[in-house]
Image (cartoon, rainbow, N blue to C red):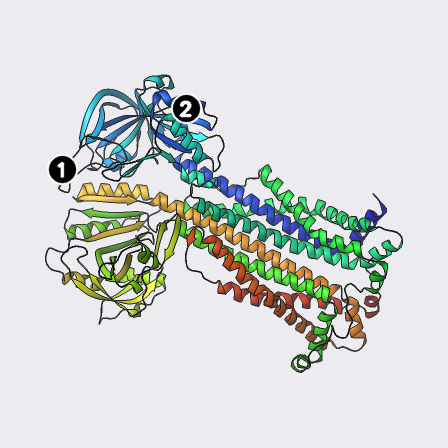
Amino acid sequence: MNVINKLTLRHLLLNKKRTLVTIIGVILSVSMITAVTTFVVSAQDMMIRDAIQGRGYWHANFSDIEADKADVFLDSPHVEQAMFMHNLGYAELEGSTNEFKPYLFVQEFDAASMENLALDLIDGRFPERSDELVVSEHIGYNAGVEIAVGDTLELAIGQRYFEGKRLGQDKQFMLSDDRVVQETLEIEFVREYTVVGVVARPTLENRSAPGYTVFSYFDRDNLATAGVLDVWMTFANVSGAIYEQGQELAAAAGVQVYHDDPLSGERTYFVRYNSNLLSMYGVTDNPLIGNVLNTFALIAIVIIMVGSVALIYNAFAISISERSRQLGMLASVGATRRQKKNSVFFEGLVIGLVGIPLGLFAGIGGMGVTFYFVDPIIANLMAMPVELRLVVSSVSVAVAVLFSALTILISVWIPARRAAKITPIEAIRQTRDVKLSRRDVRTSWLTRWLFGFEGELALKNLKRNRRRYRATVVSLTVSIVLFLTVSSYANFATVGSNMYTQGLNYDLSIYLGNVSVEEQQEFYRQVMGMEAVAEYLYEQTLYASMELPPERVNELVREHWEPEDGLYTYSVYLHSLDDAALANYAQEAGVPLSVFSDDSFGAIAFNLFRAHWDDMIVESEAIKARVGDVLEIDLIGFGEESHFEEVELVAFTGHAPMGSSAWGRPNALTLVVQETVFDAMVAGLPENTFANDRRTLYVNSPEPIALEAQLRELLGEQFAGDLHINNQAKAAQEERQFVLLVMIFITGFIVLITLICIANIFNTVSTSIGLRRREFAMLKSVGMTPEGFNRMIRYESVFYGIKALLFGLPIGFGINYLLYMAMSEGFLFAFTMPWQSYIVVVVAVFAVVFTTMLYASARIKKENIIDALRDENM
């Protein structure tokens, strides 16, 4: 170790507080970088495991593959693993109480398929021979047919046909409106099976599928005679190239990706991707969404880097300011510019060798503690089947180390160049930092009149040491911009995550048809009283229509729909809520019940729509209207007959009632009315025209599957009719998981950046005050009182804050708009300003600066004047 490096180490040891503050800055920066990489890897791991448990471990599925093409998948370098499924066909399920699901659908899985396609074995074992079968527990609680392990089934298996066309699981059971079966089952062979296991309802089975899926064993030795197969596979390298590779595999196997029926226009896909799992790897087939995600990831990295550089740079810049005389003396005895520069780089190396390992430990440990407390919350709120565990990968650690080292290098670069240029005379006279020309420190008479002598002196102090003042203002400005950028980032990320999801706000929708209104309401009443029902909403819906002029419709409707006689036709969904439900909805929507009047038909307009349009997700107002506007609605809806009622818009909201969602057509509007208003409207309809209404019960439940079984049991015991249950619990749970994880990331990100900003301000301001010990001692020596000193400090705080806000707020606004433009590549919504964040940052800047200056100056005031005047940092 040379003499320069020894002197650098000695300086670090003698200035323990300054060294400790710098190391803490590096630790905080490295821990933030490490925490972000660790969180991303851990959250990705959890979401991948959840996606695999929910839908299975597969990337792509190819349907209707001829058996002689199996080698295409077995021999391809793009394929990690190929799994084969053979669809045998349908067999009638005797005793099924579900008229829409009268079949068993028999599939043969090879061993790899049973392991990877999300079959949750509840009882018994998986089949090992072609005469063994596992059945779904869904058959018991949905069809009312009990099949147990050990039972023997003789199945007459064949294919479904309708109008000469073969039907699969994607085509629901063909019933006419008067319940006449329109399809046929053509038996091909009879086979006897022994039931060896029971599985949970298969997640790959469509809910509208006409057959309960049961599974037998497929022996790969029989590939040559299997006929047509379905292939499930995983790619060797998961990247954006898999979609092109999938097309190549489909072409080699002789299948189309999809086929459009020329008569019906219906599209049938032969190649499907596990988009839920692939999205967890960051792979999406929507390039615009991918661009948005990449842009936001890049912005997050830039935010972290800027915050880290600002924090660490200030520490080293202050260190160089303290060491300027030492470096000048070294130059006077022959130290070269390169040696002085290397001295600063060596200081950065020492600080990095201490701070980076501690930062890694702090970041990983901090995320471990966070996960320890957050995982039970996620488990309780989301009922997630997988835990949020700490995952530390070598890649994430390497990225954190390299990124941290780069951050320290960038932070040290400018101070090192400054150190190299220091001459002995400049170091002794301190002419680099202090400007004493009369013109530079001139102030306006208005300053003395407004702020007094102490205020003028405070401003002169800032002007006198412009370099230090500018560094402090820049540091404050960077902190302001960082906080505003993160707030905007969080705001847009929240908007994007909400727009990306379907907005499911219920677990089950329940509709009992082909019964009287009295029977239907009694059934709903009993369901509402079940213990498994946590929350419910009984809703009547009337499907109506209206016509609007061009100035009242949104831009999408004007651009893509043609008006008739100058008017655009809108669908209207009229929802009726009882008094209690309406009160709850009004409260959630932020609308007082007093807006309703007995003199008119009042409605709350859910005036928001969301749609996929031109590869974008668009969110906008459904109509252009104001409170008090009256809409003329045709309650009969579409057709030759009409019955108009006037509805007054008493409030607008973007909060959807339970059972509704913003997703839909741009030319549709949802209105929520009182039950009495709805009944009055219906009462005015002509006879035999009220055929487009629907009474539905929406519920949330902690046990949705068990509740569905109870509902079907209740139907069989006490009621007749057709029970339609749409169980959205799994999809709703996945949406809530996604949004919750986004919010956890955003909250953690905001906390980390806020800590960086506060630490940056505290470090900069307190050090700036600390370096002015001799100046303050001189002021006290010439008679400045403690009260005058405090006033001077307060005015300096005000000047620092005002100058930083003058720069920081406009820059923050510009970055906010740039983020919005980046978001607009895939999500189209109205631009909004996070005003709360701007108010918070204004208050916080003055509070933090003032508190820090008081804290730092209070320590200096206790020092002896003589000791402070002869203070040297050597």
Report x, y in % for residue 824.
45, 54
**Left/right of residue 788 with respect to residue 43 in the rendered view:** right
Whether residue 205 is visible, yes or no, is no
Q: Which residue is mark 2?
A: 72
Position of residue 223 relative to residue 421, above or below, is: above
Q: Residue at x 59, y 38 (%)?
A: 395
- Tell me whether the residue at label 1 lies in contact with that at label 2, contact meaning CB atoms closer than 8 angstroms: no
Query: Disc 1 marks which amino acid?
Result: Val
Residue 540 in picture, x, y percent from top left: 22, 56
Quadrant of the rendered image containing residue 765: bottom right
User: In this picture, is 465 found above or below 295?
Assistant: below
Secondary element under disc 2, as helix, strand or loop, is: helix
Q: Residue at x 72, y 70 (%)?
A: 463
* x and y, in percent, of residue 379 in the image: 44, 45
Secondary structure beneath dot 1 equals loop
Q: Which residue is mark 1?
A: 180
**Which of the two discs, 1 and 2, sits closer to the camera?**
2
- Label 2 Cα neighbours within 10 Å, binned few <14 / some 14-19 / many ≥20: some
* Quadrant holding the N terminus: top right
Determine if residue 642 is in view.
yes
Q: Determine which quarter of the picture holds residue 81.
A: top left
Instruction: Name the one closer to the observer, 648 or 559.
Output: 559
In the image, 309 versus 336, the foreground residue is 336
Residue sitting at x 50%, y 48%: 374
**Would you say 133 lies left or right of 339 here?**
left
Please, which residue is most extreme toward the right here?
Answer: 333
Q: Give the number of marks.
A: 2
Q: What residue type is disc 2 on?
A: Val
The mark that comes first in sequence, 1 or 2, is 2
In the rendered structure, the answer to whether residue 190 lies left or right of residue 394 reads left
The image shows residue 870 at horizontal and vertical percentages of: 84, 66
Q: CA distance from mark 1 to mark 2?
A: 44 Å
